[in-house]
């Protein structure tokens, strides 16, 4: 399933300064019945966003109208817990294209990269600067430059680099998942196969 190409993202951000956010908090298990990637955004952080009577919890950040954007800034150890790929689907379906943290669970990171959400791991010090910048000005914009592997707080021009697997980077810049990549090199594979002896 192809997704949006990712090159340079310039956006305000939604701050979630909570550590150890696990996948059951991102998308509770009772919402894992669907097999398509659509509709999960409605239940992103469901138990944190809504009361038992389905009314919004005003204090939760996603219900606060002063915060918006395509970037979610989380605390340390984001995406821990079970390996459910639905957590990444929920993040994408809600509209986020980038998640920033000082540490990601490996499986969650991989699931994000597979569907077009860029997990940007920064130092704890830079993460703190981001949170403080957003606290001071909710409309603070960040620039995530995938080709250069940099993230910048535009108001202060403070910048840090991040690392990403080259294969995943190439896929994200082209909007490919693993199947799209194989289809893109189908002729190369065919040519190689025809050159091999039986």
Image (cartoon, grey):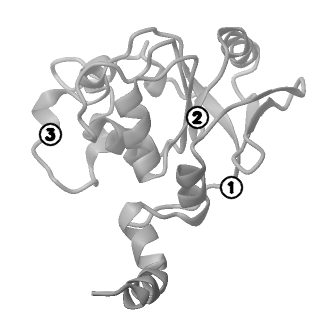
What whole-number distance in Å separates the C-alpha atoms at marks 3 and 1? 30 Å
| Residue beneath disc 3 | 32
Name the image quarter holding residue 120.
top right
Q: How many marks?
A: 3
**Looking at the image, is 174 positioned above or below residue 140?**
below
Secondary structure beneath label 3? loop
State the SS at label 2.
Answer: loop
Image quadrant holding the N terminus, namely: bottom left
SS for dot 1 = loop
Going from N to C along the chain, the mark reached first, 3 or 2, is: 3
> For this view, does 179 lie left or right of residue 146?
left
Residue 63 vs residue 40, the one in the foreground: 40
Nearest to N terminus: mark 1 or mark 2: 1
Asked whether the residues under the numbered discs 1 and 2 touch, taking CB atoms below 8 Å apart as contact, a structural biologist would say: no
Q: CA distance from mark 1 to mark 2?
A: 20 Å
**Which residue is found at the position 27% from the left and 19% from the top?**
81
Q: Where is residue 34 drawn, in percent x and y?
A: 14, 50
Q: Residue at x 16, y 22 (%)?
A: 53
Q: Which residue is mark 1?
A: 7
């Amino acid at each position: 399933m192809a997704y949006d190409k990712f090159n340079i993202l310039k956006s305000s951000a939604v701050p979630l300064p909570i550590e150890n956010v696990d996948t059951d908090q991102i998308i509770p298990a009772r919402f894992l019945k669907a097999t398509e990637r659509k509709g999960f955004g409605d239940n992103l952080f469901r138990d944190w966003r809504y009361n038992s009577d389905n009314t919004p919890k005003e204090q939760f950040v996603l219900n606060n109208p002063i915060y918006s954007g395509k970037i979610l800034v989380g605390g340390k150890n984001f995406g821990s817990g079970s390996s459910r790929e639905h957590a990444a689907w929920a993040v994408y379906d809600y509209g986020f294209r980038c998640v920033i943290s000082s540490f990601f669970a490996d499986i969650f990171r991989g699931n994000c990269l597979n569907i077009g959400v860029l997990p940007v791991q920064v130092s704890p010090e830079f993460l703190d600067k981001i949170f403080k910048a957003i606290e001071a000005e909710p409309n603070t914009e960040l620039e995530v430059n995938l080709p250069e592997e940099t993230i910048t707080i535009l108001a202060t021009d403070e910048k840090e680099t991040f690392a990403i697997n080259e294969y995943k980077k190439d896929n994200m810049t082209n909007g490919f998942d693993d199947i799209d990549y194989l289809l893109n090199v189908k002729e190369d594979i065919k040519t190689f196969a025809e050159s091999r002896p039986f």
